[in-house]
Image (cartoon, rainbow, N blue to C red):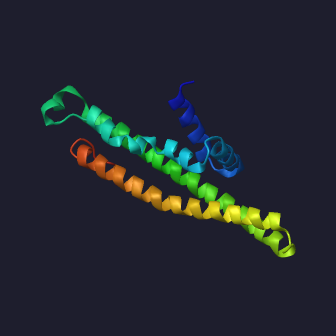
């Protein structure tokens, strides 16, 4: 299985939501050193959009040689899928981590002297804050990608109105 297909499969599993995706996120986060690397992998399409557009969408002088409308449509669909997938992953992890924080707070109230529990609570709270800040990062990344996409594809492809 090639790396790109493997990454797409993992990202698809993460995007499904539920406890399995949260566990997978936790496992991969540890494996990839941290969650930021995982999101970096998931943001590959956004990082490479300028290159993708430069190599696939023709300039006016080469317009007749490539079907730019089909290329732009495929890129649009890929961006929509990637953005929705990352949004689901981040929001699902926020929900799961929020539940863990709530549970740890309840346990902490029952046992105020347990320092291990306090450390675990602080760790989960830090992770929750980071995940919430990733929603803001995601907005910036998505806006940048759509701006670049629209600059190059606006004359070749019109996205559906409902999206």
In the picture, the quarter occupied by the N terminus is top right
Residue 53 place in picture, x, y as percent: 29, 38
Name the residue: 56% across, 41% down.
Answer: 11
In the image, residue 107 sits, relative to residue 10, either above or below, namely below
Question: Residue at image x 51%, y 41%?
Answer: 41
**Dividing the image into 4 quarters, which one contains the C terminus?**
bottom left
Residue 163 at least partly seen: no
Q: Is residue 29 left or right of residue 158?
A: right
Q: Residue at x 75, y 64 (%)?
A: 119
In the picture shown, does residue 132 fall above or below 88? below
Q: From the top left corner, tell me how far across and down residue 82 is, in percent.
A: 47, 45
Most extreme residue toward the left, as rendered? 61
Residue 98 image point, x, y percent: 67, 64
Residue 86 showing in the rendered view: yes
| Left or right relative to 140: residue 98 | right
Q: Locate residue 72 relative to residue 123 in the image: left or right.
A: left
Q: Residue, x 33% and y 36% (percent of image)? A: 52
Residue 143: percent from left, percent from top: 36, 56
Which image quadrant for residue 46? top left
137 versus 73 height, above or below? below
Closer to us: 106 or 33? 33
Given residues 10 and 81, the one toward you in this image is: 10
Residue occupying the far top of the picture: 1
Q: Which picture quadrant has residue 49?
A: top left
Q: How many marks?
A: 0
Say whether residue 145 is left or right of residue 138: left
Residue 111 falls in image quadrant: bottom right
């Amino acid at each position: 299985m090639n790396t790109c297909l493997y990454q797409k499969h993992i990202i698809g599993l993460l995007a499904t939501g539920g406890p399995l995706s949260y566990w997978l996120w936790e496992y991969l986060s540890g494996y990839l050193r941290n969650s930021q690397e995982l999101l970096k992998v998931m943001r590959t399409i956004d990082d490479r959009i300028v290159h993708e557009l430069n190599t696939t969408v023709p300039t006016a002088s080469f317009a007749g040689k490539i079907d730019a409308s089909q290329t732009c449509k495929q890129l649009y669909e890929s961006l929509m899928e990637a953005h929705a997938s990352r949004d689901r992953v981040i929001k699902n992890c926020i929900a799961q981590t929020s539940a863990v924080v709530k549970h740890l707070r309840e346990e902490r109230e029952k046992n105020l002297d347990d320092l291990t529990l306090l450390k675990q609570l602080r760790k989960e709270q830090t992770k929750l804050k980071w995940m919430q800040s990733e929603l803001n990062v995601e907005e910036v990344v998505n806006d940048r990608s759509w701006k670049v996409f629209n600059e190059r594809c606006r004359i070749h492809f019109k996205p559906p109105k409902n999206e």
